[in-house]
Image (tube, rainbow, N blue to C red):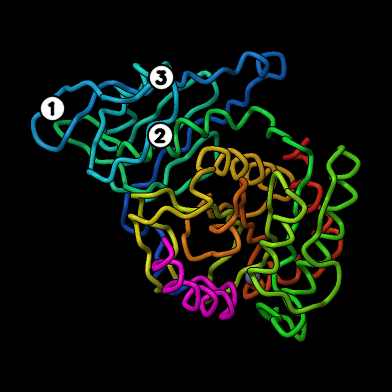
Amino acid sequence: MPRFHLFLVPVLIAAWLQGCGTSQWERGGVTGLPAPVEPANRPIPAERQAEVVVDRQPGSMIMRPGPPETAPVSGRQNNIPQPDLTPTWLSLAQWASESGLGNVQSISTNQFHLTTHWGVFGFAERAPYAIFNGWQFRLGYPVRISDGIPLIHSLDAEKNLRPLVTSYERVPRGNGVICIDAGHGGSHSGTKSALGEFFEKSYALDWALRLQPLLEQRGWRVVLTRSDDRTMSLEERIRVADQADAHLFISLHFNAAGPGAAGLETYCTTPRGMPSTLTRGYSDPMSATMPNNHFDTPNIHLAARVHSALLRHVGMADRGIRRARFMTVIAQQKRPAVLIEGGYLSDPGEARQIGTGSYRQKLAEAVAMALQ
Ligand SMILES: [Zn+2]
């Protein structure tokens, strides 16, 4: 860890200072690939939400590429399994059934639904993302099909699917302290609006200042990394969260990329052994354990709550819950942490929206709603 840390920090800082743009290659999307068939949105009725209990028993059936083979998973008790760096593919249907999560139906030869008590997942062969109750999340490994059987990677099963079914549960409050980080500031202006001399740092701060009272009304003690236009290092932002002993950390940003990119993205730290959705060309050491990896399950739980609330309340285009390792401000956190990209300032339409106080108020309200 120390050697990795020392090597990576300058790279990470350099990456961050370049702003929040999404690289050209990353925007390739899913052109030419089958898209998951979007399942009907089936939210859980309020009276059933209290029933939501996750079966923590891991799947016991392993299927590896080639002839199906069964073997018990050893050393796994009633907790989340440790990441396995050996490529391990599971029968989606068997894993879901044995985990008590639900049943798989074929929609076509390469599209599948997994219907659970908590909602419906949609998958398609080779697609880099899947759908849960109408919104996207990026997979570490696209679903494969072998002899007509859909296979899912064990890391996606345990680090994405299983935690996502808890997203109807409230986010645990812990000590009730939350750290809200307005991205950039001072000499770090962040992304410039397509519409003129307006910068990400100002919009992010306004979002944070609007969010603070909404969270306080809901009983949170809110600590802001900055409440004015000042330059702060990423390490200083982490120190603010540490000194406040914050239970949660949320970093607020806006995005930029070439023409056509628009919509909402929510990032959390990539689990060990999984490739990141976004690297911006920097190293993505899959065998590294980041401090924030100790919170893989609450990270995506928080991300799912926030992401789905934003889509519902703000009506943005959905670019999915995504994974990154180079985002120091979340990867080095010793608490559940997410980074939200609340729209693309490079897109004239979204830049116009982001420039209005009513839009930023909606962003704030959506995050607060996710943390009821
Ligand atoms: Zn940013």
Question: Magenta part mainly helix, strand or loop?
Answer: helix
Q: Does the magenta stretch include residue 15?
A: yes
Looking at the image, residue 358 sits to the left or right of residue 169; the answer is right
Q: Which is more toward the observer, 173 or 321?
A: 173
Residue 277 location in percent, x, y? 42, 58
- Tag on residue 299? none
Q: Going 55% across and 55% down the picture, which residue do you hit? A: 267
How far is disc 1 from disc 2 in space, using C-alphas? 20 Å
Q: Is residue 62 visible?
A: yes
The answer to whether mark 3 is within 8 Å of ligand 1 is no
How far is disc 1 from disc 3 in space, using C-alphas? 22 Å
Q: Of the residues shown, which amino acid type is indicated by label 2?
A: Glu
Q: Going 21% across and 37% down the picture, which residue do you hit? A: 145
Quadrant that contains the C terminus: top right
Q: Going 56% across and 74% down the picture, which residue do you hit? A: 16
- Tag on residue 68? 1
Q: Of the residues shown, which amino acid type is indicated by label 3?
A: Gln
Quadrant of the rendered structure where residue 303 is?
A: top right
Residue 285 location in percent, x, y? 35, 62
Query: Counting residues from the N terminus, which is met first, the one under dot 1 or under dot 3?
Result: 3
Quadrant of the rendered structure where residue 275 is?
A: bottom left
Query: Counting residues from the N terminus, which is met first, the one under dot 3 or under dot 2?
Result: 3
For the residues bearing labels 1 and 2, Cβ distance under 8 angstroms? no
Reading the image, the residue beneath label 2 is 158
Q: Give the range drawn in magenta.
A: 1-22
Query: Counting residues from the N terminus, which is met first, the one under dot 1 or under dot 2?
Result: 1
State the SS at label 2.
helix
How far is disc 3 from disc 2 in space, using C-alphas? 11 Å
Residue 112 location in percent, x, y? 35, 32
Q: Is residue 105 visible?
A: no
- Tag on residue 57? 3
